[in-house]
Amino acid sequence: MNKDKIYPAGILRYIEESKKYLSDRKKQVERIKKLKFDTIAVHGLYTIEETLKHNQGAVIEPLYLSTAQAYRDADEMEAALSYLIPTWCYTRFANPTTYYLEWVLALLESYQAGCQASCLVTASGMAALMLAIDPFLVPQKDKKEKINFVSSIQIYGGTFQHFSVRKGQERGIEVRWVENPRDIEEWLAKIDDNTRFLYAEAPSNPQQSFCDLKAIAELAHSWEIPLIFDSTCATPALMRPLAYGADIVIHSLTKTLSSGGLAVGGALISRQPIVTRIKNDNPLFKESFAEYVKFFPYRDYGPAASPINALLTLNDLRTLRSKMDLLSQNTQQVADFLSHHPRVYQVDYLGLENFAFHDLAKKYMKLVDSNDGQGNEINRYGHLLSFRVEGPPQNARRVFDNLKLIFRAGDLGRIKSIATIPAISTHLQQGEEARLKADIPPQMIRLCIGGENPEDIIEDLDQALRSF
């Protein structure tokens, strides 16, 4: 709101009405933030007051399928479209159902993190990625400056493609790859005055790479640039990067957060404020980045989430903590089995003590609100692993083809166990040279463990491994 501008009386009336709504909502947020993680996941900001006052007593958040919001008069419409009062206006801009999801995700990611957060939900994880990075990739001095950003090379194949092709080849923006994300000196060596942000994914898909999140955030901030972090595989039930200094967290909601496998979506959650040296006249850019993106780039690009997908995701994440506890324990059993199998030469799982990234993951990945009996949270390492089959790549394909219970698909994060061979699916476009640098050999099978009894999954794996 422009304090120097004189608004007509009609618009001022709506502004005054909205102040009470915003004041009440702020009090609700403070009250909800005092609750436990599970309670927040179940209720979010959909309170009894919200139910009775706005939604005819509906206990579950309503699905708003309308494409547009009607206004009482011209003054309310002008106030809404000038962002002077809360509004959703048009489902390409926002939607009440999507708001409920955004509010709960912001609360979960900032749970016990010592900061406030804002959230934007998008049509897919790739849309969230694009919206998270594009606002930083703008000239600051002149159009000839060599803009760059620094990223771990151990990332999802679609992210690699977006960075290397869409940003590198098509726009001439340099991505500087870090091959060993544990090495803080390698990160440091890649940064210069034209670096816009650091980017990491942990646990990475598929090789379960990890990095020292706190140290990388501190490095980024020493250069006045943000750390953008993909936490899809961990979810806020196991790790909340904002608590360690990350500025922006992105998720593919399609994956673990909506494990039912019926919804596609993405999310961008930002701390308030972020660290950045990018000059932008809009104060929201730094103070509430997710809101800035929602009001401006998102509105212009149009990657809106479907309200149906928002509701499906909202319903799936209500049991997130207990689900991640169960799936992590199931995966630990399967990883232990595979690590002793004579036809497997390597298992990539953070829960294995001899795995290269175990110690780093142990520092950061903990089941929220758990207790080991001595006041410490319990380590849980998620439900994604990879294993590498002995012999030529054909052996891995034979094992893959002989799975009877585990589904063959490029998906992950499902309540049903799913396997893929990354070299011929999720990371195919990355190319052999880049896969080699990212440690994705053709003998690798990525396995995401679901809610089945782990003994049945182990039996299926054993019979498949005995097929060659």
Image (tube, grey):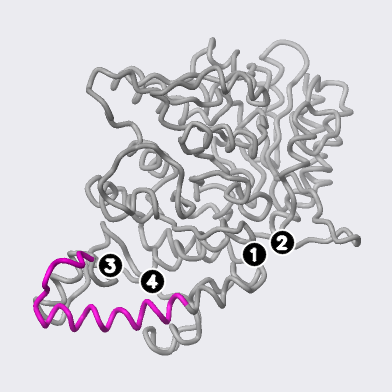
Mark-to-mark CA distance, 2 and 3: 33 Å
Front of the two marks 2 and 3: 3
In which quadrant of the rendered image does the N terminus lie?
Answer: bottom left
Mark-to-mark CA distance, 4 and 3: 14 Å
Q: Can residue 267 be seen in this view?
A: no
Residue 292 coordinates in the image, percent (x, y): 32, 52
Q: Is residue 196 visible?
A: yes
Q: Do the residues labelled 4 and 3 touch (CB within 8 Å)?
A: no
> Which residue occupies 80% across, 47% down?
454
Which of the two discs, 3 and 1, labels the residue nearer the N terminus?
A: 3
The residue at which mark 4 appears reads as: 63
Q: How crowded is mark 4: few (under 14 residues within 10 Å), some or many (20 or more)?
A: some
What secondary structure is marked by label 2? Answer: helix
Residue stretch in magenta: 1-26
Disc assigned to residue 319 = 1
For residue 324, side relative to residue 179 (left or right): right
Residue type beneath disc 4: Leu
> Which residue occupies 81% across, 19% down?
345
Q: Residues within 10 Å of mark 1 (few under 14, many from 20)?
A: some
For residue 387, side relative to residue 257 (left or right): right
Residue type beneath disc 3: Trp
Front residue (pair 233, 116): 116
Front residue (pair 338, 102): 102
User: Image height check: is 420 above or below 294?
Assistant: above
Disc assigned to residue 322 = 2
User: Image height check: is 146 above or below 252?
Assistant: above
